[in-house]
Image: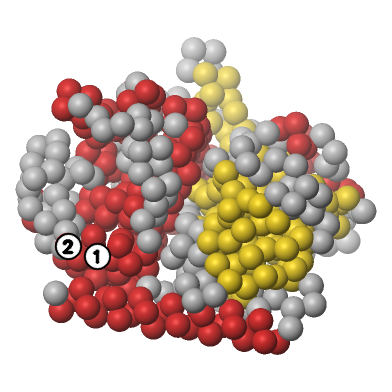
Amino acid sequence: MSVKLDFDTSKWIKSQSNTTECKIKRKQKQIIELLDYDICISFLFNDSRNIAFVRGISTKKKEFNENMIPHTLFLNKRQYDSINELIDKKDIVENHYHGRLPLLLENINSEVFIPIFKYDNVEDLSMKLIGYLYLGSTTYKEFPYSFFSEDKDINEKISDISKLLTLCLARMEQISDAINLMEIFIDILGHKDPYLSNHSYNVANWCKEIGMELGFSKDELNELTFAGLLHDIGKSMIDSKLLSKAAELTEEEYQIVKRHSLYSEKIVKNILGHIEGLEDIPEIVKYHHERYDGKGYPIGLKKEEVPLKSYIIGISDAIDAMLTDRPYSKAKPINAVIRELYRNKGKQFHPQLVEIMVERLTKAQKQLDESHLNTIGLSSLIVNQEEEIIIVEGSLVNMNNYYIFKPTKESTLEKIELSKITDVEMVMKNLNNLSYYEVKLEDLIDNIFYISSIKLIPSPNTFNLLWNLEGVLNWPDDNRKTPIEITRIGGDALSFCLHNNIAKDMPYGKPLKIKVIFEEFDLDITGSIVKSYNFGPYKYFDFHYTNIPDTKRDAIYRQLFKKQIELRRTVSKYKVD
């Protein structure tokens, strides 16, 4: 049995405001009264129909707390057999206590699942199953099929809920399509210049950190993250020879490269400009090279004429450029970066943002708990499958109530079987910081991992560094010495990175020696590489010490503390100057 829908829904959908879920709840309360049930919930399916999302909960009795009801259901579990039967039959499914199917909610004796459809093709009037309406009763109750099918009022309310869910679905699809397009363009940038894809994620991370310091809302942080990821997307329209030219650009070449902010605006307008809540991003991206003193481009705006979020992207862009090796420039030491920030305070950079950025640069990076993860971020899944460990590189997408992980290379999934996985961890890159998380993996469909929760694994004994700490890796077989950049160090382990071209044939599990080059002395540490991860053009390695004496461990902590004090003094000096 299905519900008849009014055909002309497009005008109705466009006329709706942001109160979609409130309207759904009102319709549900009316249905509860008409059919005499205790609870009514509207669920929406994802495209694969392996997940159902709550989009409205209405109850008659106070004992039903919304927190008791899961807002995201992963349907590959037995307790959701009723929903899977509805998907197969595309018809109403009724269930009772001690029946053949598990009940969805506790304290419920009778429940019914009503399929919700939308018109999928206007020409042939074909319909698509997009969700279902759940009705639950605390007492035994037979579903009134005849009343349901004959009562015009009930059918109209179900039809209205269908339209509202269609509106929710359209929003979900818009965001999903936009994220897919963003990833495609970022991948194109990586092929134009390997630096650019990593740069996009770094700028997004810096933007988010500044936004958090400014007290931005979750929606504002999402907007800022998208803008940071897409700020350089216009460089996909610029000749790669100009983007990676080692020599200084001619004036004509510089004018060509400057066009990228206008190209970015145009591309972003096509990707995000039609999505409610994200329509300001094209303008934010357009002005990210404007300066506080009015000497920027493309227009030459100044001070408050420039959106604050454009200034945030501008300073984030500059910081990542200064801290990164490029064909035409070497990474600057942190002291020099701080000097540049103060030298350009009120000129290139917004004064308030300089103080926030300096404060951020002089502190060791914090680990990010799951509530602070970006909408999209570079990450690697560490899949423990019986006796085998498989590391899958890709990107994590935060879908609010759950996460999806999209692998970069599908070939790495051939050995993975969901039933054989014992546990899963994730490592995520935020600037130079690698943070580790426990992952609850729910499903793997069409090469997409579905994750219900992520929890930070604290690492109290290591400190993430933004300043340059150099080292030398001694290879065990041929006595080669390779310079490395140490990104995290502590009393028991360190992490370092190398360009992918240099990182081939790294000796895993073998005894190695790393020389850590502090300003006052060098420190030799023995240990072995236990894990590695690819992020953009760089490979990061976890190196665990073996038999390190307390004197060396204490020396590491003293140097970290000394560096912190030194940076504080640097800040004080430039503030006075």
Q: Is residue 488 above or below residue 301?
A: below
Quadrant of res 268: top left
Kindly identify the amino acid type of the residue bearing the numbered disc 2: Arg
In the rendered picture of this protein, how many numbered marks are placed on residues?
A: 2
Q: How is the image coloured?
A: secondary structure
Q: Residues within 10 Å of mark 1 (few under 14, many from 20)?
A: some
Q: Residues within 10 Å of mark 2 (few under 14, many from 20)?
A: some
Q: Residue furthest top?
A: 123
Q: Is residue 308 left or right of residue 459?
A: left
**Residue occupying the point 24% across, 70% down:** 355
Q: Is residue 145 above or below residue 59?
A: above
Q: Position of residue 566 (x, y in %)?
A: 37, 79
Residue 370: tell me if it is visible: no
Q: Position of residue 168 (x, y in %)?
A: 46, 43
Residue beneath disc 2: 343
Residue beneath disc 1: 339
Label 1 element class? helix
Kindly identify the amino acid type of the residue bearing the numbered disc 1: Arg
Q: Position of residue 66 (x, y in %)?
A: 57, 68
Quadrant placement of the C terminus: bottom left
* Contact? badges 2 and 1 (CB < 8 Å): yes
Quadrant of res 332: bottom left
**Residue occupying the point 74% across, 47% down:** 506
Disc 2/disc 1 C-alpha distance (Å): 6 Å
